[in-house]
Image: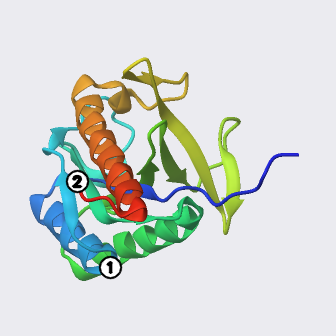
Amino acid sequence: MGDIRAHRPVMVIVAAFSRYDAALDWARQTCSDAWGPVTRESPRFTFDETTFYERAMGAGLKKTFFVFAHLADPGELPDWKHQTNQWEQQFAATHDFPEQRPLNLDPGYVTEAKLVLASTKDRDHRIYLRRGIFAENTLFFHGGHWKTRPWTYPDYRRVDYHEFLTACRVDLRQRYAEERRRKRGVRG
């Protein structure tokens, strides 16, 4: 029998996409007001690998990622997804945009080994967590590179996304090393 231990804290990441810069700015501010400072933000990537979202969100979408200073328990992923869904609804209700869904927020987390995203949709490769939320292991890190799965969304196959996630992983590893030094009482 293996020893049961708590999971190491993880790096919280939110993928935000919209055709409106104002929506992405609002998302950044709203997320950081709730979850603390953004320590890393990606460029606003063109999001044109699929037309799936155009009916609800319009054309010309851009996607950006926000990463937060506070490391968190990955078991909180369902709570993050419920919160971001509420924020999406709040934004749509309080801003005058013609689209049904002017903002999409997808929370997840980065570990040294993987990128996990939350979803409200069940699929064969997703694991049910709680409160109607599933977890998807979207990418994994092996041999010094991010690797895709058969179900990995087309945009998450992009090299520029992987470069950003590698920088996040480096940040996370540095945070873990600092924590180990702090626990040992060593300054570095």
- Residue 106 showing in the rendered view: no
Earlier residue among tags 2 and 1: 1
Asked which secondary structure carries label 2, the reply is loop
Q: Amino acid at mark 1?
A: Ala
| Mark 2 or mark 1, whichever is nearer to me | 2
Position of residue 120 measured from the top left corner of the image (x, y, whole percent): 58, 56
The residue sitting at 64% across, 61% down in the picture is 6
Taking depth in this image into account, of 22 and 157 the one nearest to the observer is: 157
Which labelled disc corresponds to residue 67? none
Asked which secondary structure carries label 1, the reply is helix
Position of residue 164 measured from the top left corner of the image (x, y, whole percent): 23, 37
Position of residue 94 measured from the top left corner of the image (x, y, whole percent): 25, 82
The residue sitting at 29% across, 44% down in the picture is 168
Task: Residue lying at the far right in this picture: please name it.
Answer: 1
* Disc 2 to disc 1, C-alpha distance: 31 Å
Vertically, is 181 above or below 50? below
Quarter of the rendering containing residue 51: top left
Q: How many marks?
A: 2
- Residue 95 showing in the rendered view: yes
Taking depth in this image into account, of 160 and 179 the one nearest to the observer is: 179
Taking depth in this image into account, of 1 and 89 the one nearest to the observer is: 1
Vertically, is 86 above or below 109? below
Packing grade of label 2 (10 A; few <14, some 14-19, many >=20) is: few
Position of residue 185 measured from the top left corner of the image (x, y, whole percent): 36, 64
Quarter of the rendering containing residue 25: bottom left
Q: Amino acid at mark 2?
A: Gly
Mark 2 vs 1: CB contact within 8 A: no
The residue sitting at 11% across, 58% down in the picture is 21
State the residue position of label 2: 188
Task: Residue lying at the far top in this picture: please name it.
Answer: 143
Taking depth in this image into account, of 45 and 140 the one nearest to the observer is: 140
State the residue position of label 1: 34
